Each structure stands twice: as structure tokens, then as C-alpha cells.
């Protein structure tokens, strides 16, 4: 049997079956099988493992790209000593991602530069590492997209994008006030995810100021009720990290 040709043919067949993980390691594994005298089942087990690993890596990188995180910074990059109002243990508990199973929410409140986005991204990365689906968006971007989607009748489809993920991270609530119609869109997302899927919200506004963001009092109460019913609130009272003196 012509070894080179048969390897080539094997590769072709593996490709036809979309076994890309096996294609990648075939040469190496064949060599290993010869050199180390691997048994047939041992060889097959290794190849199957390669395929599984490759699929799992592909899924992870696909989920990572779909999450649209603005940067990649983990909990280990966060300097808790700089922000003593944050209870490190509480954040570490959240980093176990048990909150996702309970569909509870997290609210990060604090002035600009206090690490709200950083912490939300860190929790997003943790969720991804557990194989969960994540979507990061600024509140403004989500509102804009939902608004635009009304124009081309893709509203329901767009809404689904924000509902289907295990974790929705909405950044920067309160930087801009909303128009009445957009508040309704925001409410739609919050109420439909209520007790079904977690939301992390970052904001520079304390809860008492939310009626300024959502304008309508009744809707504000409805939004706050649903978000806060099962939630962890982390209020960061400290300086901006951007002004941190270099030491
Ligand atoms: P916010 O969203 O609250 O405005 P960010 O999370 O964007 O603040 O933080 C601003 C910058 O400072 C980011 O680069 C972030 O990684 C960094 N940063 C903020 N707080 C900390 C911290 N405690 N330790 C390490 N880096 C921090
Ligand atoms: Mg931010």
C-alpha cells in the first residue's frame, strides 16, 4: 500500500466527514502510532480525542467572538487593593458563575474609571470559560439597534439576539437619557429575561436617579422591580483607576 497516497486519501475522506480536528493531527498520530507501536483502539481513541478537543476549541473561539467583549481583562488583572469598597470575596463568588444557573442579575454602580466595565468583562470571560453564551453591548448600542430594526421589520429577530444568550452585559446605563419608545424596548428585554437569563448592568447612576434615565415613572419602577428582585448590587465608591499614580 502506498503510504503517502493513502494518507492523502484518508485526509480527503476525513474532510468529507468534516473531521477537521483529525485532519490536523493525522500525520503526527500516524507517525506516533508507528514509532510507539500504538494499538488500533489506542490510535483511534487519540484521533477521536483530537477531534473533540478541536471542536471544543472552535466552539470556545466562536462564542468568544460572538460575545463582542470590548477587551480581554480577567479578574486576576483587577487590583482589588485600589478599590477597597468592592468585596473581593463577593466578586470571586460571582466568578464561579453560579448566578447564571439562578438567572440572577448583577448591577455595578460607580463613577467613570472605577472598573465597572473591567469587572463585567471579567465575569463575561468566566462565563465563556464555562461554555456559556455571552453578549456584551452598551445600552445605547442595543437601544439603537432595536430602534433601527423596527424600520426593516427585523425587530423580533433582533430582540431574540438579546434574549437567547446565557449572559447579557449592558454597559453604560445612564450616560444618555432615553426616549419613550426606547425605554419600552429596554423594558421588553428586561422583562423577557426576568428569571430566565442573567443581565449585568454597569451604570454611573445610583438607583434613586434611574427615573431620570427612563423618564417614565411607571416604567422605571417596573424595570427596577424586575432587575432588582434577584440581584447582586456592587456599589463602587472610589477613585478612577485612570488617575492612579504610577508607582
Ligand atoms: P468604568 O467602566 O467604571 O468607567 P473601566 O472598567 O473601563 O471603568 O476602567 C478603566 C480602565 O482602568 C480600564 O483599562 C480598566 O482595566 C482599568 N481599571 C479600572 N479599575 C481597575 C482596577 N481596580 N485594577 C486594575 N485595572 C483597573
Ligand atoms: Mg465603562
Image: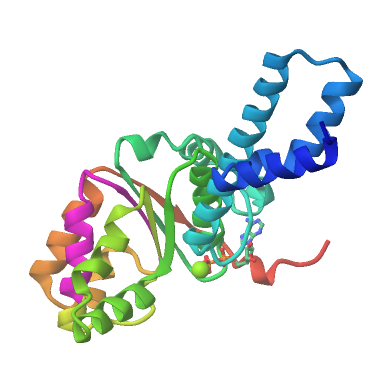
Q: Quadrant of the N terminus?
A: top right
Image coordinates of residue 63 in percent, x first then y, are 50, 53
Residue 160 makes an appearance in the image: yes
Residue under the point 30% across and 43% down: 104
Question: Nearest the camera: 95 or 108?
Answer: 95
Left/right placement of residue 13 relative to residue 162 reads right
Query: 50 left or right of 203?
Result: right
Task: Say which residue appears at 38% left-offset and 77% top-offset.
Answer: 141
The image shows residue 185, relative to residue 15, as above or below, that is below
- The question of residue 63 being in magenta is answered with no
Q: Is residue 174 visible to the viewer in this orientation of the structure?
A: no
Instruction: Please tell me whether residue 174 is drawn above or below residue 170 in the rendered image.
Output: below
Q: Residue furthest bottom?
A: 151
Residue name at image x 8 percent, y 68 percent: 218
Q: Which image quadrant for residue 42?
A: top right
Which residue occupies the foreground of this view, 140 or 12? 12
Q: Is residue 198 magenta?
A: yes
Q: Position of residue 3 (x, y in %)?
A: 84, 35
Stretch of the chain drawn in magenta: 183-204
Residue 247: image location, x then y, percent: 83, 61
Q: Position of residue 111 (x, y in %)?
A: 48, 68
Specify the quadrant of the image occupied by residue 224. Answer: bottom left
Q: 247 or 38, which is in the foreground?
A: 38
- Residue at 64% across / 65% down in the picture? 241
Amino acid at each position: 500500500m502506498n503510504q503517502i497516497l493513502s494518507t492523502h486519501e484518508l485526509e480527503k475522506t476525513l474532510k468529507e466527514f468534516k473531521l477537521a480536528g483529525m485532519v490536523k493531527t493525522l500525520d503526527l498520530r500516524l507517525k506516533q502510532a508507528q514509532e510507539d507501536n500504538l494499538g488500533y483502539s489506542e490510535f483511534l481513541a487519540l484521533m477521536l480525542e483530537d477531534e473533540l478537543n478541536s471542536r471544543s476549541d472552535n466552539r470556545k473561539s466562536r462564542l468568544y467572538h460572538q460575545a463582542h467583549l470590548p477587551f480581554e481583562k480577567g479578574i486576576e488583572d483587577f487590583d482589588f487593593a485600589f478599590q477597597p469598597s468592592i468585596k473581593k470575596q463577593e466578586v470571586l463568588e460571582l466568578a464561579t458563575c453560579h448566578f447564571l444557573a439562578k438567572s440572577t442579575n448583577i448591577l455595578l454602580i460607580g463613577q467613570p474609571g472605577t472598573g465597572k466595565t473591567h469587572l463585567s468583562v471579567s465575569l463575561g470571560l468566566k462565563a465563556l470559560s464555562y461554555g456559556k453564551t455571552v453578549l456584551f453591548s452598551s445600552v445605547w448600542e442595543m437601544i439603537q439597534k432595536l430602534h433601527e430594526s423596527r424600520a426593516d421589520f427585523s425587530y423580533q429577530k433582533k430582540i431574540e439576539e438579546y434574549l437567547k444568550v446565557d449572559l447579557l452585559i449592558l454597559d453604560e446605563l445612564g450616560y444618555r437619557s432615553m426616549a419613550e419608545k426606547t425605554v419600552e424596548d429596554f423594558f421588553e428585554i428586561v422583562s423577557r429575561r426576568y428569571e430566565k437569563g442573567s443581565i449585568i448592568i454597569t451604570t454611573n447612576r445610583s438607583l434613586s436617579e434611574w427615573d431620570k434615565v427612563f423618564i417614565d415613572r411607571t416604567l422605571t419602577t417596573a424595570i427596577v422591580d424586575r432587575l432588582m428582585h434577584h440581584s447582586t448590587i456592587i456599589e463602587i465608591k472610589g477613585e478612577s483607576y485612570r488617575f492612579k499614580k504610577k508607582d
